[in-house]
Image (cartoon, grey):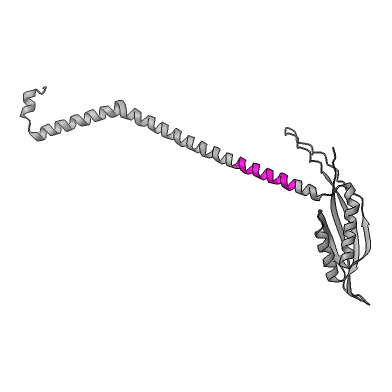
């Protein structure tokens, strides 16, 4: 039986309020089904896309920062390489460099028993190892731009004189290493006090343009 306007007028205020409340619920449910549900779904999708885009932007910003860091490191390495080249003697400078080492010994007050330069040691570049079947070939090792020159040295002098010789060699503005140091027992020598016989290898590196 349908409700008429007179029937609605006869209802109590509570019943009227309940009917209005039910109408609001029905209208709200219909609005949710027809409009709000679709909008919420689209909002969820857009929120997920926004999160993905934010992550991609953060990753790209991090990659840009890494690239800038690598560029700075490469620039610093190039500068260090140029400095190293300035300290690397060429073939014409080797005799003068060895003379500087000998003069350092004389200035430190040691006597040379042996000062034997050896010819440059050029290490051959080994060919790249054969790659396993189905794998890309391994790149060849880069050819070195320097040759190693070593000098066998035996000297006699006081301990402080020997240490002074090492210090003076270290101050020569070229790349020089002292390796294989072997000091004997100190012996008393008339007129010179206690002296030590020391053997070592003095190494330097000669720049070679292999072009």
Q: Position of residue 105 (x, y in %)?
A: 88, 63
* Left or right of 6 on screen, residue 25: right
Question: What's the residue at 16%, 31% (across, down)?
Answer: 20
Instruction: Give the x, y percent position of residue 86.
Output: 79, 48
Q: Quadrant of the N terminus?
A: top left
Residue depicted at x 7% and y 25%? 7
**Residue at horizontal 13%, vertical 33%?**
17
For the question of whether residue 199 can be seen, the reply is no
In the image, residue 159 above or below residue 49: below
Classify 87 as above or below 195.
above
Could you say where residue 109 lies in the image, as x and y percent from the top left?
89, 68
Rendering quarter of residue 138 = top right
What's the residue at 9%, 34% (across, down)? 13
- Quarter the C terminus occupies: top right
The magenta-colored residue range is: 66-81
Which quadrant holds residue 195?
A: bottom right
Q: Is residue 162 left or right of residue 46?
A: right
Say whether residue 75 is magenta.
yes
Seen from the viewer's position, the closer of residues 175 and 32 is: 175
Name the one closer to the observer, 184 or 88: 88
Work out whether residue 198 or residue 83 is closer to the camera in this orientation and state it: 83
Residue 61: % across, % down: 54, 39
Secondary structure character of the magenta stretch overall: helix
Indicate yes or no whether the magenta region holds residue 194. Answer: no
């Amino acid at each position: 039986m349908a409700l008429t306007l007179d029937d609605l007028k006869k209802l109590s205020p509570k019943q009227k309020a309940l009917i209005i409340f039910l109408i609001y619920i029905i209208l709200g449910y219909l609005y949710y089904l027809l409009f709000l549900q679709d909008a919420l779904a689209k909002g969820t999708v857009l929120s997920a896309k926004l999160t993905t885009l934010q992550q991609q932007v953060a990753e790209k910003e991090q990659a840009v920062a890494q690239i800038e860091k690598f560029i700075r490191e490469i620039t610093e390495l190039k500068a260090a390489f140029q400095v190293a080249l300035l300290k690397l003697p060429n073939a014409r400078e080797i005799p003068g460099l060895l003379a500087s080492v000998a003069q350092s010994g004389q200035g430190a007050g040691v006597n040379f028993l042996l000062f034997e330069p050896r010819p440059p040691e050029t290490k051959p570049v080994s060919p790249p190892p054969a790659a396993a079947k189905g794998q890309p070939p391994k790149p060849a090792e880069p050819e070195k731009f320097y040759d190693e020159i070593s000098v066998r040295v035996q000297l006699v002098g006081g301990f402080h004189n020997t240490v002074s010789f090492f210090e003076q060699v270290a101050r020569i503005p070229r790349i020089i290493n002292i390796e294989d140091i072997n000091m004997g027992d100190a012996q008393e020598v008339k007129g010179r006090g206690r002296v030590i016989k020391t053997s070592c290898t003095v190494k330097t590196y000669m720049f070679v343009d292999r072009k």
